[in-house]
Image (cartoon, helix red, strand yellow):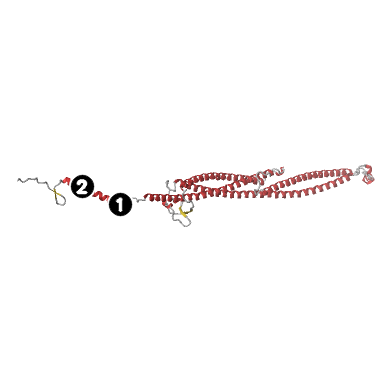
């Protein structure tokens, strides 16, 4: 029997030193597949181990809901802090508007009083026109009344100008209040499910506080909450403190400061104008009182001069009567038959004396001359009496005018003192 001849197989050695009969490529591919499977299995095991610590738990939905609710609650609390701050500033704005309205009422009342003072000044000037013609010459009281009018007009213009500014500021405050109200309503839209009771306490913190600084710093027993200062909050268009909120609050603060300054300036203007008007009115009253005193003094002097005039007139009348009596005596009787012997120019002694030539007596000429002298004296005395009467009439007229001027000025002083309290309607008849 013949022996079979077999071919000698090609032998290869694996990595362990054993001889193999299979092809190297065939073995290499198998080894690669095993290594790849082992690598994938290792990675899978590693991913499982990592997933045990990182992958969501079976109750992920509930956790995410709780986290979302917590985030929403945090946002609500922050928005509530902003809303309460806005309400706090809104209350301050309303208080400033109320105070500015009071200042406006004070300005209107002061302006109304100045108009009453102008009316009283006008009536005083009109009353002074009722003085007699002799007393209508311009005097210091007229200058004081004109100065009072100018000061009152100036005070009235200043009050009107400031009142216009206050009214304009009130309109601006109202517009700012409407804007803040709109911002407040917009911020309050997310507070339907949140308790709005919050005691606002503004705390001063460091500059540039982040959005986290708006969170509640710690709930106290009374539910109070510390809120950062307005200047320290971080502005975020998508956060609780938006640019619109910042602009509205900043405009509120600026407008409130301008309103406070206007209010203080208005009150100071009222005090200044009142003091100025009081000084001017006091000067006018003192001037009228002084004019009355001067008129009374002149009236008394006129009355004294009237008495002297009356005394001189009576004295001159007595002298006239005496002179007239002497003139009548110097004329002698009206009828020659009434002459006695010793009164005649041709009485016996004179006839005897005239028997010698050139013996004439100037008795008749002297009698005529004496009568003419008495007539001249009577004429001069009569003229003096007439002049005294004219002077007396002038003095009496001056006294009457002085009394009328005193009455007018006294009535003006009484009127001004009675109307000084401004408790009378502007349309009241004087």
Q: Nearer the viewer, residue 137 or 191?
A: 191
Q: Nearer the viewer, residue 120 or 168?
A: 168
Residue marked by disc 1: 50
SS of the residue at dot 2?
helix
Residue marked by disc 2: 32
**Image x and y of residue 49, in percent:** 29, 52
**Image x and y of residue 50, in percent:** 30, 52
**Image x and y of residue 391, in percent:** 77, 45
Instruction: Return the disc, 1 or 2, that comes first in the chain's sequence.
Output: 2
Query: Is residue 69 something that shows in the picture?
Result: yes
Crowd tier of the residue under label 2, counting other residues whose Cα lies within 10 Å: few below 14, some 14–19, many 20 or above: few
Left or right of residue 169: residue 20: left
- Identified at 73% across, 48% down, the residue is 299
**Residue lying furthest front:** 1
**Image x and y of residue 207, in percent:** 43, 52
- Identified at 84% across, 44% down, the residue is 374
Left or right of residue 222: residue 323: right
Crowd tier of the residue under label 1, counting other residues whose Cα lies within 10 Å: few below 14, some 14–19, many 20 or above: few
Q: Nearer the viewer, residue 83 or 136?
A: 83
Q: Quadrant of the C terminus?
A: top right
Left or right of residue 84: residue 270: right
Left or right of residue 329: residue 109: left
């Amino acid at each position: 029997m013949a022996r079979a001849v077999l071919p000698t197989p090609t032998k290869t050695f694996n990595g362990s030193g054993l001889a193999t009969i299979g092809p190297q490529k065939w073995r290499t591919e198998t080894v690669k597949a095993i290594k790849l499977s082992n690598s994938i299995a290792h990675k899978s095991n590693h991913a499982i181990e990592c997933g045990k610590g990182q992958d969501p738990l079976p109750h992920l939905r509930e956790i995410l809901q709780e986290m979302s609710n917590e985030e929403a609650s945090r946002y609500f609390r922050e928005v509530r802090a902003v809303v309460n701050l806005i309400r706090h500033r809104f209350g301050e704005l309303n208080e400033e508007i109320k105070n500015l309205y009071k200042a406006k009422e004070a300005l209107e009342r002061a302006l109304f009083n100045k108009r009453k003072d102008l009316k009283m000044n006008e009536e005083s000037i009109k009353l002074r026109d009722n003085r007699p013609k002799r007393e209508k010459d311009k005097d210091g009281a007229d200058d004081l009344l004109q100065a009072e009018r100018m000061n009152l007009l100036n005070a009235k213009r200043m009050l009107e100008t400031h009142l216009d500014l206050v009214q304009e500021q009130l309109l601006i405050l109202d517009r700012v209040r409407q804007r803040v109200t709109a911002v407040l309503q917009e911020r309050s839209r997310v507070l339907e499910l949140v308790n709005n009771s919050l005691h606002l306490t503004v705390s001063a913190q460091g500059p540039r506080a982040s959005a986290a600084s708006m969170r509640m710093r710690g709930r106290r027993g009374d539910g109070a909450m510390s809120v950062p200062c307005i200047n320290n909050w971080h502005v975020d268009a998508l956060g609780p403190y938006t640019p619109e909120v910042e602009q509205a609050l900043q405009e509120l603060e600026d407008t409130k400061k301008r309103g406070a300054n206007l209010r203080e300036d208005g009150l100071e203007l009222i005090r200044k104008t009142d003091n100025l008007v009081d000084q001017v009115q006091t000067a006018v009253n003192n001037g009228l009182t002084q004019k009355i005193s001067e008129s009374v003094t002149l009236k008394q002097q006129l009355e004294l001069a009237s008495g002297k005039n009356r005394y001189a007139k009576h004295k001159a009348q007595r002298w006239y009567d005496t002179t007239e009596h002497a003139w009548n005596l110097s004329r002698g009787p009206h009828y020659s038959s009434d002459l006695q012997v010793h009164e005649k120019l041709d009485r016996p002694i004179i006839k005897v004396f005239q028997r010698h030539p050139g013996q004439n007596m100037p008795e008749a000429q002297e009698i005529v001359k004496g009568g003419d002298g008495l007539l001249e004296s009577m004429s001069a005395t009569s003229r003096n009496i007439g002049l005294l009467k004219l002077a007396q009439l002038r003095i009496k007229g001056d006294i009457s005018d002085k009394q009328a001027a005193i009455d007018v000025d006294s009535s003006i002083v009484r009127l001004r003192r009675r109307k000084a309290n401004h408790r009378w309607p502007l349309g009241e008849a004087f």
